[in-house]
Image (spheres, rainbow, N blue to C red):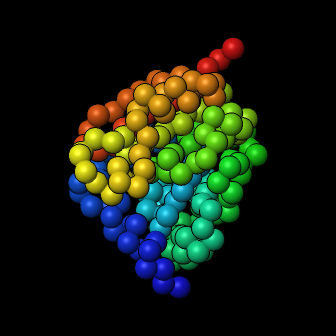
Amino acid sequence: MRNLKAEMFNRKAAKPGNKADEIIRALALKRGQNVADVGVGGGYFSLRFSRAVEDDGKIYAVDTNRNFLEFLKIESEKKGQYNIETNLAKQNRFPLRKKDIDLVFLRNVYHHIPDRVNYFKDMAASLKEEGRVAIIDYDGRGGFSFHRLFGHYVPKTTIIDEMSKAGYGLCKEFSFLPQQSFLIFSKIQE
């Protein structure tokens, strides 16, 4: 089944300027880890994560678009990557009720979530104690752009503040993406 939009998302994610290899290295995934990829689009990162965690790990591919998930399912089966499970979600609720997730990954999705503080509070129950949340989103740098024009960005300070309110602390920040912030959070231990 062709999905031109999903294919376009994958081509865009793979472009050298989007630094996918650097993102994968920065996440330092290990064999056997479980990753939730929220807002998979065409599944480019889900497929990359699947190889990184190998057959011992699991990828929970999450999207609100059923067609994107079906596209990813077909692509992963073609490639023999059977550790990817697709999950249809609503925008306002984290759909996974498991407590075994090592990493939740969101790339260019954060600005689409309507009630972010409650969304991430809800998510905390699904993360392992040492689990991490990686958020990459446009932050408003770069002058006039599609992202600024249509409000498809969130300033880094807003993300940090909202994640703090949801019970997370910033543990790492990467600065190699020219128009996006790349932040990694962990749950604040009480």
Image location (x, y in percent) of residue 175: 29, 34
Above or below: residue 50 compared with residue 190: below
From the viewer's perspective, is 164 left or right of 183?
right
Residue at 54 percent of width and 56 percent of height: 39
Of residues 165 and 131, the one drawn nearer to the viewer in this rendering: 165
Of residues 178 and 98, the one drawn nearer to the viewer in this rendering: 178
Q: Residue furthest top?
A: 190
Above or below: residue 118 compared with residue 4: above
From the viewer's perspective, is 138 left or right of 127?
left
Q: Residue furthest right?
A: 97
From the viewer's perspective, is 37 left or right of 117?
left
Which quadrant would residue 157 be assigned to in this image? top left
Residue at 41 percent of width and 46 percent of height: 153
Residue at 56 percent of width and 43 percent of height: 104
Q: Is residue 5 among what the camera can see?
A: yes
Image location (x, y in percent) of residue 150: 41, 55
Above or below: residue 100 compared with residue 75: above
Q: Is residue 128 among what the camera can see?
A: no
Of residues 122 and 36, the one drawn nearer to the viewer in this rendering: 122
Number of residue marks: 0
Image location (x, y in percent) of residue 31: 52, 45
Residue at 40 percent of width and 35 percent of height: 155
Which quadrant would residue 65 be assigned to in this image? bottom right
Q: Residue furthest bottom?
A: 1
Image location (x, y in percent) of residue 159: 48, 33
Q: Quadrant of the C terminus?
A: top right
